[in-house]
Amino acid sequence: MANYTRGDVYSDLPPLPEYRTSLMPSLLPGIPDKLLTVILPIAAYWALSMLFHWIDTKDYFPQYRLHTPAEVSSRNKVSRWEVVRDVVIQQLIQAAVGWGLGLTEPDDLVGKEEYEVAVWARRIRMAQRLIPTLLVLIGLDVGGLAKNLNQSHPVLAGVVLGGKYSALQTTSGQTGFVVSTPGFTAWERTLASAVYWFIVPAIQYGIAIVVVDTWQYFLHRAMHMNKWMYTTIHSRHHRLYVPYAYGALYNHPLEGFLLDTLGASVAYKLAGMNTRQGMWFFTASTFKTVDDHCGYSLPWDPLQRLTSNNAGYHDVHHQSWGIKTNFSQPFFTFWDRLLGTVWTGGDVSARYEKARVAAQKKADQEDEKTTITHSNVTDSATQDPRPYQEDKKTATGLSSIPFKDQQPHPPQGKAELQAAGSRQQVLDDKKGGGPQVLIQEAAEEKEARSLLRRAGRRRTASSLSQTDSLKGLKDRVTGSMHGRAGALIGMESKR
């Protein structure tokens, strides 16, 4: 690439260096970055999914499961083969769009970094010109202050004078003329480097996260609030009432394109990322989506610790009583909280108890502070019922549900309205099981409560300490629900 020298109209500013650009070397030799941007998110999806599948099949960490293996077989309305098939279809669409997106992007170049840092250093120098005016406004004598500082702190004196650093002037003679050239201070170069290498990329990633969270929240919510969109398109994803890792992208192809592929592409473009940045953003989004559907509440999983939008939070959205809540994905929950669509009923299902006790022991917190769903049960009575104020009135099919008294019982208030609207949406999806889903849930909820009561009685009869009691409850509930659920419900305990 050719040299570039900027004609300088700012004679009192340090000059910008020349630069020569060349193509950025590929991250992996032999694979262009634009192709790797397509491949890496797909590889990450299956790598992390197979890790969680291996944990499932080896039955590691049963105490942190959100659901028993039997529930995967009995409650899900789609086979694993159908899940794999539809995920592969979505990833083929994703790959095609990703390759097309890459063709619209210029090649990443290297060699201009020092120039860009110098541009930021100039901006910092120009910003300093405001300092004398600000100091005068608060009544300080700029000249006198700079004179006092000049002997002991000459750099600080230059800042006070608005970026005038006489000691940094370099003089050179050529053809009989003497030229004085200003230079940058060490702190200006350091700050400019931090801005260029860290702050600007962090802002770009932040913009991309906000854009993709906003895009997915409003489109996802629309797919639940519009009956036709739900039953025709989005209900396919919710036939996984018990999510597992490689079902994260099990969607209708149109939904997969609009919600995930297009949303991430728009975020990438609006954030002004280059190809290498996009590669990491798409891969991180994929990791987060898989982790949110993994089926485990893991207290030491960094993706679950960094944000409350995690597997426990999203699992509520897959349950019959919470399907019209917790729309936020994949990163943060700010839209749910701002617009009142976060689940307010606490850990309403007894099936969460085993994971809650395990998390409680790990976190060493008080019981009322530890919830798998990351919701506070007292919010149900205190929060504004909007946008669910009409859901109980319009849930006309709930009266026909058998075993209503055996369903998970949300607290009165907003959670009750959320559960009514969610269950009506389940009934609307006839192809996805409809009433049968709620009947199965009632049977499993009844069994979960029974196991917890028996575990509680055994705990009460013992003379263990409080710590030992929690451990005993966890082990008994986990063992009973995990080992016996298949036989009790009439399903194989095999995932």
Image: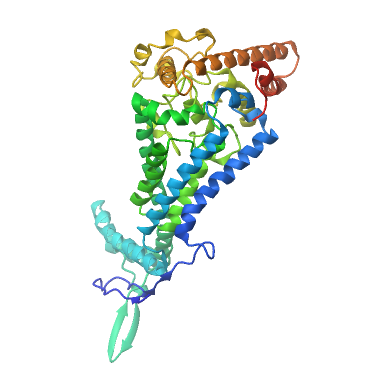
Q: Nearer the viewer, residue 332 or 163?
A: 332
Give the answer, above or below, for where 308 lies relative to 445. below
Q: Nearer the viewer, residue 459 or 426?
A: 426
Q: Nearer the viewer, residue 264 or 409?
A: 264
Give the answer, above or below, for where 12 lies relative to 45. below
Q: Residue at x 47, y 10 (%)?
A: 401
Direction from residue 336 to residue 360 in the image, left or right: right
Q: Residue at x 55, y 16 (%)?
A: 440
Q: Is residue 321 visible?
A: yes
> On the image, which quarter does residue 303 sit in?
top right
Q: Quadrant of the N terminus?
A: bottom left
Q: Residue at x 53, y 29 (%)?
A: 78
Can you give x and y, in whole percent of width and height, for residue 371 in the image? 54, 25
Can you give x and y, in whole percent of width and height, for residue 394 in the image? 34, 14
Direction from residue 319 to residue 131 in the image, left or right: left
Q: Residue at x 70, y 35 (%)?
A: 58
Can you give x and y, in whole percent of width and height, for residue 375 in the image? 48, 24
